[in-house]
Image (cartoon, grey):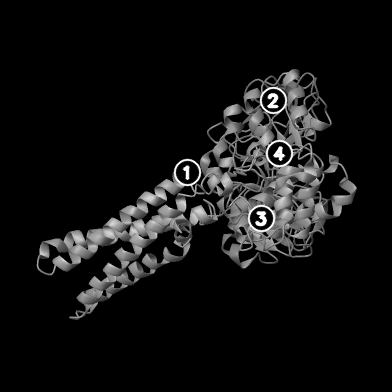
Amino acid sequence: MLELLGRLHPLVLHLPIGILAFAYALEVYGIFKKEENLSSAQSFTLLLAACSATISVATGLLLTRGGDYAGELVSNHKWLAIGLTVICWTLFVIHKAYGKNAKLKGPYYTLMISSAVMLGITGHLGGSITHGENFLFESNELAVIPDIENAVLYADVIHPIIEKKCISCHNPTKLKGEYNMTTPELLIAGGENGEAILVDAPSESPFLRRLHLPMNDDEHMPPDAKPQLTDDELKLVEWWISTGASFDQYVVETENYDEYKPIAEKFLAPPDVDIFSKIEKPDSSTIVRLVSNGYKLYPVSSGNSSVYVNFSNRSDLKKRDFDQLRKIRDNVSQLNLDSSSLTDQLMSQVNRFKHLEKLELQNTTITSEGINSLKELKFLKSLNLFNTKVDVTSMEKLLSFPQLRSLYLWRTGYTPAQIDSLRKKKPRLDVIYEINQDIFSDVSLKAPIINSKSEIFNDSMKVSLALSFQGVSIYYTTDGSDPDSNSTVYEKPFYIKETTTVKAFVQKKGWDSSPINSKTFVKSGNKVKDVKMHNQPHPGYKQLAPKNLVNNKTGSLVFSDGEWVGYEGAHARNTFMLEKENEISTVSVGALESTSSYIFFPASIEVSTSEDGKKFTKVAEESYAIAEGANGAERKMYTLKFEPVKAKWVKVDVLSHLKNPEWHEAPGAKCWIFLDEFIIN
C-alpha cells in the first residue's frame, strides 16, 4: 500500500506548483487592485498550497523507500521540497496575521519571493532526476558522429542507444533494480538480480531476455511507458553482446561486420562527413571587415561554410585576435598557428572554435598544459604538434578526441616507447613521429619578412629582415637577382638610397630552403602637377582621387584605410602631367590583392608618354596572371622599366580582370582593383 502511495508522487507533485503559481498571480494582482475578498482568497490558496506540498513531500519520501532513488541530487531535491513546504505553512500563518500587524508584511513578501526561487530550484532538480541532469540546458550543438571506418562499436553505437533508452532509469540518482548502466563495468555487473550480460553465454544474458519479453510483461525493459528500442537498435545490441560485448573493438573489426554493416551505417556518418553543410555561411560583411583589418581568412570549399584562419608567424598574437573572430567561430574548420606567439594561456581561446577539424600548433612554445586545457574539439581530425614542448602527460587528452586521425609528434617530449604505447591504445590513429619531409611540408621554412616604414622614400630607407624561427641564416640581394647561399648574409638592418628590389630567403641545415620573398622600394620621383582621370573610381572612393594616387603615401593591407582608390569591374585610366618635362625611364604602381574581398592584382599595365599631351607613344606594357587560389591581403609595387624618354605627360592604363575567376566563391562577380600610388622617375 505504501509503495502504491509513493508511486502517486509524479501525479501530486504538480499540485503545489500550480497552486503556488496562482498564489503569486493573486499577490501581483492585489498590488494593483484593492479588493476586500482578495485577502481571504489568498489565505485559502496558501492553505491549499501548504497541504498539497505536504502530500507531495510525503509521497516522495515513500517513493525513495524502494531504493530506486538515491544520491546527492535526490537528497538535495528532498530537503529543498521539505523546506518549501515549511515556507508554505509559514506564509499561510503570516498572511492570516499581517492584516492586524503591519510589521509582518515585509517578512511575508520576503518569504513569498524565497518560495518562488525554491520552487524553481526544486522543480529543476526533480526534472533532472526524471529526465537527466542536463535536460534543461541540453546543448543543441551538432552531434559528433564518427565515420564507420573509425567507430568503436560500444562507444559510438551501443552506448548512445543505452544512453537514450535506458540510463534515465539506471543511473546513480535513479537506480531502478539497483542497476547502474553508466559505466562499462556496472553495465556488465548488473543489479539486484546479478550479472546482466553473460559474456560466456551471451544468448542467455538477462539484459537481452528483458528486451525480448512481451510489452505487457512487468519485467520487459524499457517499461511500456518509455521509448522502446527500434528493430535496428535491438539487432545492434544483440550483435554486440553475441560477439563478446567488447568495449574497445572497432565496428569494422567486429565479427559478422558485413552482415550488420547496413544497419550500423544508419547510426554512423559516412567517411569524411561534411558538418559545415549544415552550418550557415558567415555574413559577407563580417568577412570583409575582418580581411580589411588584416586577418587572413580563406574559404575551404565553395560547397560549404567552412573557413581557414591563418595566424602563422604572428609574433604579436593576443586574446583580442581570437575575440575578433567571434562571429565566424562556428565556421572555422582549420586554424593555423604555426610559428606564432601562442602560449598555454592562449590555448583556452582555441576551445572556442568548436568545429575545428585541423589544428596546426607546430613551432610554438605550448606544453602539455595547453593541450590538456582543450575540451570542446569533438570534430578534430588532424593535430600538428611538431617541434613543441608537449610530452606524455598529454596522452590521455590526445586519446580523448573521438575523430582524431592524424597526429604529428616529431620533435616533442614523447619517447619512441611512449609513441608505441599511444599507437597500441588507438591503432587507427596515424601518429607521425619519424622525420618525413613530404609529411612535414606544412612546416618547412617560411620566407623572411621584409620590413620598412614605407615602400616609398625621399632620400634613404632603413630595411630589416625577420623570421620567428631560431638557428636560420637569411641571405639577400638588392640588385634584383635571386639570392643564393653566396649572397650577402643578413646581420643587421641596412639602408637603400635608390629604387631597389630586395630579395631574401632562409636556409637551415637539414631543411629545404624557404621560398624567396621580394619587395620593391621606390624613391619618390617627378612631381605631378595634375591628374586627368579618364574613368572614375567607385563612388565610395571618388573623393579620395586623384590626390591619393600621387601623395607619396602607401596604403596598408586594409583597403578601407583611406589611402586606396578602388575600381569595381572597371579599368583605371589616368594621365599624369608633370611639373616640367623630364627624362623618365620607370613608372611604379602600387596595388592591393585580397581575394576573399573580390580584390585582385591588375591584369596588365600599359605606359604611354607624350611631350605635348596630344600624341602618346606606348613605351612599356606588362601582363600578369590572375591568382590561382585564395590569398590573404597583400600589396605589391609594380615597376615598369623602359628606355629613357623625354615626357611631360604620362598615361598609365591599369587593366582589371573585371570578374572573379571560376575557382572563387563568387565566380563571375565583378572584381576590384585597388591602387594607391603612381611614381614616375
CB within 8 Å, label 4 to label 2: no
Q: What residue type is disc 1 on?
A: Gly
Q: Secondary structure at mark 2?
A: loop
Q: Position of residue 552 (x, y in %)?
A: 60, 47
6 is higher (above) or lower (below) than 156:
below
> Which numbered mark, 1 or 2, is in the foreground of this view?
1
CB within 8 Å, label 1 to label 3: no
Q: Secondary structure at mark 3?
A: loop
The residue that appears at 75% across and 57% down in the rendered structure is 654
528 is higher (above) or lower (below) than 47:
above
Which of the pair 639/253 is nearer the observer? Answer: 253
Q: Rate crowding at label 1 as few (under 14), some (14 to 19) or many (20 or more) other CA atoms within 10 Å.
A: few
From the image, tell me which residue sits under label 2.
387
Give how far apart the Cα atoms at labels 4 and 2 are: 34 Å
Residue 221, disc: 3
From the image, tell me which residue sits under label 4.
520
Classify the position of the C terminus by image quarter.
top right
Q: Position of residue 186 (x, y in %)?
A: 63, 39
Going by the image, does 508 lie left or right of 177? right
Give how far apart the Cα atoms at labels 4 and 3 are: 77 Å
Give how far apart the Cα atoms at labels 1 and 3 are: 23 Å
Which of the pair 524/510 is nearer the observer? Answer: 510
Give how far apart the Cα atoms at labels 3 and 2 are: 53 Å
From the image, tell me which residue sits under label 1.
71
